Amino acid sequence: MKASQFFISTQKEAPADAEVVSHQLMTRAGMIKKLGAGIYSYMPMGLRVIQKVEAIVREEMNRAGAVELTMPVIQPAELWQETGRFEKMGPELLRIKDRHDRDFIVQPTSEEVVTDIARQELRSYKQLPKNFYQIQTKFRDERRPRFGLMRGREFIMKDAYSFDRDEAAAKASYQVMAAAYRRIFDRFGLRYRAVAADSGAIGGDLSEEFQVIAATGEDAIVYCPNSDYAANMEKAESAAPSASRPAAANAMTRTPTPGKSTCADVAALLGVPLATTVKSLVLATDTLNEAGEDAQSQVWLLLLRGDHDMNEVKVNKVPGLNAGFRFASIPEIEEHFGCRPGYLGPIGLKKPVKLVVDREVAVMADWICGANEPDFHMTGVNWSRDLPEPDLVADLRNVVEGDASPDGQGQLAIERGIEVGHVFYLGTKYSKAMSATFLGEDGKPAHFEMGCYGIGITRLPAAAIEQNHDERGIIWPDALAPFTVVVCPIGMDRSPEVKAAAEQLHADLLAAGVDVILDDRGERPGAMFADWELIGVPHRVTIGDRGLKTGQVEYQHRRDAAATQVALADVLALLKGKLGA
């Protein structure tokens, strides 16, 4: 490829609405162009990156035995009504009507359509297992699209769906996909972690997210540096407290804390560690009558250490709260505690509540909590002596850096990540909802056991940039770069020798199967180098008159601080060696 034949459109300044580095650099490098909120055109330079992502994904999916198809972007609502998702999914599901007033959706994912295909085409256990996948445009009507391709409304995703005869076979298919994903992400050349993720209402332990490590990542990844343990913050656990509860050393005292309504403020006022305080979180659950109206509400009090945060996913698994909960209203809180939030605690309640305490709180002594009276807290509080032992003890909190790893192999660390892939065991959630069955070996119908597996094709380049950039621009891994090598001739239009050497090297690299571009635009060296550093091509060869007089050219990797002199006769072999060509 020659630059004069390609389309290169770099910019010095990023648009004002570009909040993150990937959005800024993809726009400045001429890779994407905004059409509307969360909707982008993939320009030629950016499309080449996306196509390289697709090629790696496609090769490894095919290698793993998956079969490619394409399902429509516009799907009839009837299928989504079968599973209930047409009503339940919320405003992120874009619903439209055709000229006959029939309901359709713009697909955000395709479980319904692929399950419909399976129930029509896969009639016998002899046809299983099967894994269908597509690389297709999706649409989610994000309330606040932002960060360019990181959180757009229209995007490209690879989604795959496995169909198996029983749970054991489905779990085997899941492991095949998990291994394929590791090969895919290894080939991308990015630092990533596969982390255990929560399976939500479906249950089970088979769910992993693939996170590209980046300081700007939206997700917190918890891992043990000494072992393979890794999980997202929702799923992550620490080891249960090993120490027994100390004996009470102080008397319980009603202590003035004027205007101090947070644990941090109280700890600072009293000159004690934040970890000696206990925060009160008040939740409520509702029981509905036959008409679907609220018939009865139950108020719950959760106690966590003052320096810890509630983990909503873990709380959702507490018996009694697992059917759904909400934060209690102010009238409910005042009715049960006799006080507004800020000074709440488990002592001296007006009406009984269900008490659940975190494991760490259960082993605390001489702790501090609200006195259920404005401007006062109770200090020196102890279980058994001052209030009954808790009814229920559970893991309710987010882990923090330095917690003991649950596998006993050291302390937990936390880093940021960007989710770009997810593998998930679905079970029979969709096959039962859509009556999708096959004839088993016993001649009886059985529901398919399913898995789903996604990769954000257009999100991945943005994640790669968040991980790989500097003040000059993007630094692509070889596998994802729009071009792997750029040949930069200086004064090509004035020097026949430079022109001949550049064109010969370009031809030799093409013949060797290298993805190379020759910059024949006649730009000044500074502007030419700035363009390719911004675009992020990893390997650059500069050819000039002065060097050619001694048979030398310059080679520089995008991460190198300076260029290296290389004999013109050796540069092809050097590049082939670096690229494994």
Image (cartoon, grey):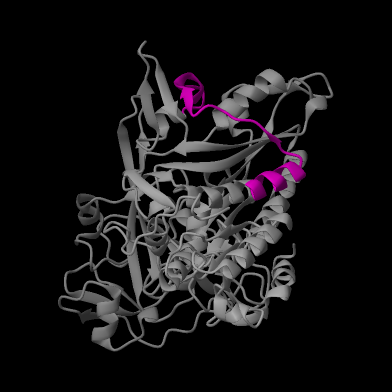
Q: Is residue 94 above or below residue 62?
A: above
Residue 338 lies, in percent from the top left, at 20, 60
Question: Is residue 70 within the magenta segment?
Answer: yes
Q: Which residues are magenta?
A: 55-84
In the foreground, 166 or 274: 166
Quadrant for the C terminus in the image: bottom right
On the image, the x and y values in percent for residue 335 come to: 21, 53
Residue 546 is covered by the magenta coloring = no
Residue 48 located left or right of residue 59: left
Q: Note whether 183 is above or below 381 in the view shown.
A: above
Q: Position of residue 44 (x, y in %)?
A: 48, 47
The residue positioned 36% from the left and 43% from the top of the image is 142
Q: Residue at x 37, y 10 (%)?
A: 100
Q: State the image coordinates of residue 173 (x, y, percent, origin top left).
A: 74, 43
Task: Determine which quarter of the picture holds residue 172.
Answer: top right
Query: For residue 337, what is the image quadrant?
Result: bottom left
Residue at 35% in and 80% down: 274
Which residue is more in the foreground, 476 or 212? 476
Q: Residue at x 46, y 66 (%)?
A: 358
Toward the viewer: 318 or 142? 142
Residue 337 lies, with reference to residue 227, above or below; the image says: above
Residue in front for this viewpoint, 322 or 215: 215
Side of 159 relative to 308 (left or right): right
In this view, the residue farthest toward the top is 100
